[in-house]
Amino acid sequence: MATKHEQILLYIESLPVGDKISVRRIAKDLQVSEGTAYRAIKEAEAQRYVSTIERVGTIRIEKKKKENIERLTFAEIVNIVDGQVLGGKSGLHKTLTKFVIGAMQLEDMMRYTDAGSLLIVGNRTKAHYTALKAGAAVLITGGFEASEAIRKVADAMELPLISTSYDTFTVATMINRAIYDQLIKKEILFIEDIYVPFAETDFLSVNESVKAYHEKNVQSSHGAFPVIDDNQKIVGIVTARDVIGKKNGESIEKVMTKNPITVTMKTSVATAGHRMIWEGIDLMPVVNDYGILQGVISRQDVLKALQLAQRQPHHGETIDDIVKNQMKVLQEDDLVVEFLVTPQMTNQFGAISYGAFTTLLAETGNYAMKNQKRGDSVAENMTIYFIKPVQMDSVLTVRPHILDMSRKFVKMEFDVFHGNVLVGKAMMMFQLLER
């Protein structure tokens, strides 16, 4: 049976897009406390199917699919630019297709402005009116207001009319940054992208016996199964190791491993992979916030997804991507990597940032292990015991030295030079990812 929190979330999700939501209304309709209603609304906001706007309230918005995650709703635009909604509040849930900078003659401006657009413009009343009539929302920059007539048009067309104190250039930069961040999120692989859903998952009930494990093992050839109770809640996991030497009639509850390590839909594949390798786990249950089994992931699924992700083109660059783009291999045998320090990689003092420096070493180490035909790895720990400030536009050379290598671990030392001057020295431990 669903908890009150789950019931509220399902209720919110069932509301029509554009509906206004309040703590008091939820509490009254579902007979729950206002505190419970408030917490559920905040989770719905985190899951991106409601948006809260100051002086407007909370609105049910369209929950975006991953392939369209870079498209923003007008409600999100209001929050990004610290805006004030002057009119057309009933259209805040709508998604914009593009934004247009109104820095040209009106006739030219309208050639680019159509239904679903957002026109960013100053106090040009005629432009406001023409854009709204064309089906576009309007964002007025510079803190200017709109006339009462324009507000009425926005309300009638159900198109947001927003005002912000920022200038046009700053607003465009802020929206671009938000879209860019969404692109990066779109590229990150989550468990929800690769998991085996509950309907296709082999599992055991807490009331079954060891005999049921052997039967499932023969049918599916799987070596591990999640164990659930009557409410589909995860209570354990049972593997071949757990049933060795156990009689067929023995209860699964007695032999299973209790409190298994689990993940949720929003756990990144990289995080799950690291945990599985570190803990020596081959199968991990996927649960919701209440411990209800949603499906499973296997170590092989995770590694396959990570290797596929490495071959995909990237649209939203992270600092890791920028660092990788500046790396150039000078020597393959006795590996030497050359690296240019760009402005994006510096701290407030103009020297290479600690984050960029550690990413450089980690990427060089990964390359060195692939050079040794050791496959993929994750960095377990790093010790930087010498570093000098390196200013932007400097060219560094990195020389990795493998000190020790076993079946599962590699210990590596790094020397970093600027010209002939040693500017950094570090040691890293990598754990190898095995199928």
Image (spheres, grey):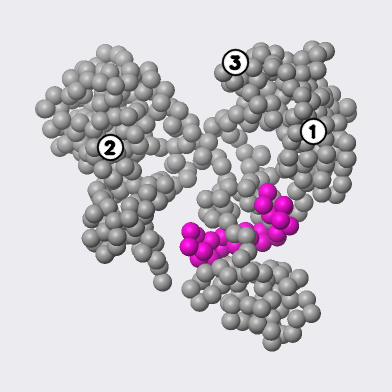
Q: Position of residue 288 (x, y in %)?
A: 50, 60
Q: Which residue is mark 1?
A: 427
**Residue at (23, 60) in percent of width and height:** 28
Q: CA distance from mark 1 to mark 2?
A: 49 Å
Q: Quadrant of the C terminus?
A: bottom right
- Helix, strand or loop at label 2? It is loop
- The mark nearer the N terminus, 3 or 1, is 3
Q: Position of residue 138 (x, y in %)?
A: 26, 28
Task: Reply above or below: 205 against 13.
Answer: below
- Helix, strand or loop at label 3? It is loop
- Helix, strand or loop at label 1? It is strand
Can residue 44 be seen here? The reply is: no
In magenta, the rendered stretch is 274-298
**Residue at (86, 35) in percent of width and height:** 402
- The mark nearer the N terminus, 1 or 2, is 2
Q: Which residue is mark 3?
A: 349
Q: Which residue is mark 2?
A: 54
As drawn, the label of residue 381 is none
- Mark 1 residue crowding within 10 angstroms, few (<14) / some (14–19) / many (20+): some
Task: Reply above or below: 58 against 27.
Answer: above
**Does 425 lie within the magenta span?**
no
